[in-house]
Amino acid sequence: MITSTTKSHSKLTYRVAVGCFYFLQGISFASWGSRIPTIQQQMGLSEAELGGVLLALPVGLLLSLPVAGWAIAKVGSRSVLIFSGILYSTTLVAIGYSESVVQLVMALFVFGFAGNLMNISVNTQGVGVEDLYQKSIMASFHGMWSLAGFTGAAIGTLMIGEGVRPFHHFLLIMFLSYVAIAVASRFVLRTDVNTDTDKPIFVMPDKSLIDLGIICFFAMICEGAMFDWSGVYFKKVIGAEGAWIGAGYTAFMCTMAGTRFVADFFTRRFGMQRILQVSGLLTASGLLIAVLLPHLYTAIVGFLFVGAGVSAVVPLIYSAAGKSKVMSPGVALAAVSTIGFFGFLIGPPLIGFIAGATSLRISFTVIAVMGLAVALVATKSKSIA
């Protein structure tokens, strides 16, 4: 439990402040994502060259995983969150300023590194606020991240329409982030929940954390597939044209964001295990609808199901990991994130390899099996209640 000295502000104040950091992380990431085509054009990069450059971001993210847990255990999530929040938005500007491929690669590496520091520290804060409420609220925090994604994409579209260079676009986001961090940082938790100096920083995860990591792994395979391949699926399999090519991705994002704001209510009512079971089944059934009925409207319905299915899994897993009895919250979150992150990396290329050998419909069927695996592992794991 968090000590009484920490509770100098109301629970709602802490919740709003921490939610603000989730939003800041989401809008920085979405701002970068919205300007990738512009940066590719400015740099004169081919598709293959862009793919190689983009690898710098996940490499930075991967290398930060052990550092994040260690740093949070040593100095606390508040310090890491403020530092990484400033670094994340500042590096966004460095991306926009990059004039060579080398500069861009270096900036993306730091962007990935800072982004994951912020991810682990803000989720540690989320676990702490959840402890104050003594009920599930983690999904609503992740809903703020999704809402920021829509906001960032909308701002990016406006900037592109007005011909604003990425550098000036990102300067605006950095300035707004600095102001928000200066205000919100005064109201985040100063002491992490479950803090225990006797808990080791470097230790093998126990079976409960491994189970959580496996569920996260399967869920993030599905998420990664949706982010990278939904448009391709609608174009090549569904035969969508024009704006309808993005209809599947939009449907997925809408239900993923919307469901996160109600998932906590259902988790409190039915329990984490039941929600994970339903989530896995929704993901699998949605993908199978899109595979078995490859028509525009049925595929949109299927992708709506997938968005609802994946929405609550990662927030619930992070919430459970933060309550680990053998690790401090930051270290436990980093451990589970490490396992899940490989799913996010493996998902998109897995679809490509299977599609190349067979077809996109077969590859999406395999991803549906991954969704089903979420429900199966949640059912079999004795540590998930």
Image (spheres, grey):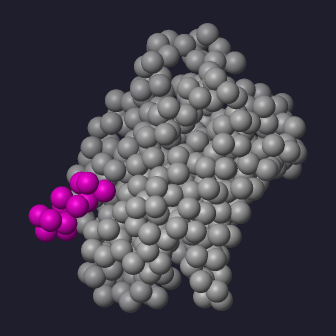
Q: Which of 370/126 is in front? A: 370
Q: Quadrant of the C terminus?
A: top right
Predominant SS of the magenta segment:
helix
Q: Which of 22/224 is in front? A: 224
Q: Which of 74/300 is in front? A: 300
Specify whether residue 162 is painted magenta. Answer: yes
Figure check: 162 above or below 318: below
Quadrant of residue 267 within the rendered picture: top right
* Image-based side of 227 in relation to 62, left or right: left
The number of callouts visible is 0
Whether residue 372 is visible: yes
Specify whether residue 178 is painted magenta. Answer: no
Figure check: 267 above or below 146: above
Which residue sits at x=71%, y=35%?
274
Figure check: 138 above or below 306: above
Residue 264 is situated, as x and y percent measured from the top left of the image, at 56, 29
Residue 308 is situated, as x and y percent measured from the top left of the image, at 53, 46
Residue 311 is situated, as x and y percent measured from the top left of the image, at 54, 46
Task: Give, as a single range, the part of the protein colored magenta.
Answer: 153-165
Which residue sits at x=11%, y=64%?
162
* Image-based side of 12 in relation to 80, left or right: left
Which residue sits at x=64%, y=57%?
284
Which residue sits at x=81%, y=43%?
379
Whether residue 340 is visible: no
Q: Quadrant of the N terminus?
A: top right
Residue 190 is situated, as x and y percent measured from the top left of the image, at 55, 25
> Farthest left residue?
162
